[in-house]
Amino acid sequence: MDTPKKNSRREFLTKFSVAALAGATLSPLFSKEQDTDSDAVEVRNFTESIESLLGGDYTNIKLKMQDDVRRALKKPVDQRRWGMAIDLRKCVGCNACTVACISENALPPGVVYRPVIKEEIGTYPNVSKRNLPKPCMHCEEPPCTEVCPVGATYKRKDGIVVVDYETCIGCRYCMTACPYEHRMFDFGEKYGDGLPFPAKYDERPSFEYEKEWKRDKPEESPIGNVRKCTFCLHRLEEGLLPQCLTTCIAGANYFGDLNDPDSVIAKIVSRLNVTVLKKEMGTKPKVYYII
């Protein structure tokens, strides 16, 4: 694994204070300006369909994205830059991605890597509903990494922000620092708590970070750690797409190497009307929203 950057105590306290204030005062979704001001969105004059841009229907596009992932894995890790795009015009709010993510990572109660926020936008009587999937943003400038006193959370060379469970002390400073309120704490709860017999689901291990994590001992990781979306790093390293993408019934998700101009994700981000959450924060998220 990549070596995390070390900070002095003074730097840590200063950055934590700033990040905590930002996280406490800003809303977790789009800023008001992004809802009302078109200048907040990179508007491009693209008149074709996504299918014509990428070639074929979503089934073919998904195969192209898997080829993109496998092509990226042939490059040195520091030459990859993973990113995701979510088409808010297509998302139907079915929560299939949420359930698939929970199952893939054997997540316990209270830990959800892929929530879908249902919100009302507009001004009465001209209102509508919007479904907003909200995974980890895997920021280029992640404030969560700057406040960790032990360097347990850091950004890999390929841009994925990770948590080293064996180093994490469970202080939860990073949870406060994240302006997207994405990080969650594993309290060791089980779905079968209170039942006269253990639930088999609770016995399933997680394979995050390409390691088997069991939950049979309450004093061992990942219990007592902060957890978050990893872009299904354990799947990526095997040449597979993130599980949330493979189960999306509406074909609203796109993924790949942003450094590859021929990849599906690079074409979408460079050609379509996209925006990011809280652009004004300067975190430079690598999750884009097509609007």
Image: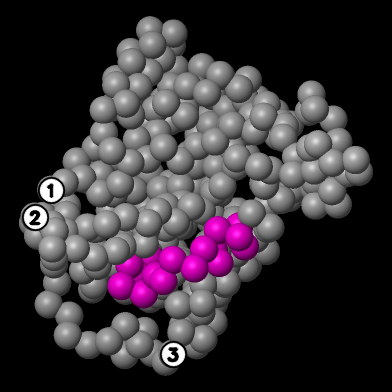
- Numbered circle sitting on residue 57: 3
> Given contact means CB atoms under 8 Å apart, are the residues at marks 1 and 2 in contact?
yes
The residue lying toward the viewer, choosing from 156 and 221, is 221
Q: Quadrant of the C terminus?
A: bottom left
> Given contact means CB atoms under 8 Å apart, are the residues at marks 3 and 2 in contact?
no
Crowd band around label 1 with a 10 angstrom C-alpha radius: few (<14), some (14–19), many (20+): some
Crowd band around label 2 with a 10 angstrom C-alpha radius: few (<14), some (14–19), many (20+): few
Label 3 or label 1, whichever lies nearer to me, is: 1
- Numbered circle sitting on residue 33: 1
> Given contact means CB atoms under 8 Å apart, are the residues at marks 3 and 1 in contact?
no
- Left or right of 50 on screen, residue 171: right
- Numbered circle sitting on residue 143: none
Residue 5, percent from left and from top: 48, 26
Residue 262, percent from left and from top: 38, 76
Q: Secondary structure at mark 1?
A: helix
Visible residue check, residue 1: yes
Tell me if residue 218 comes above or below residue 110 in the rendering.
above
For the point 30% across and 46% down, the residue is 29
- Left or right of 284 on screen, residue 234: right
Residue 93, percent from left and from top: 44, 66
For the point 32% across and 26% down, the residue is 24
Mark 3 or mark 1, earlier in chain: 1
Q: Which residues are magenta?
A: 86-101
The residue lying toward the viewer, choosing from 201 and 284, is 201
Residue named by callout 2: 37
User: Which amino acid type corresponds to the residue marked 1 in the rendered image?
Assistant: Glu
Tell me if residue 255 comes above or below residue 232 in the rendering.
below
Residue at the extreme front: 125
- Left or right of 275 on screen, residue 110: right
Separation of marks 1 and 2 at Cα, in angstroms = 5 Å
Membership of 89 in magenta stretch = yes
User: Which amino acid type corresponds to the residue marked 2 in the rendered image?
Assistant: Asp
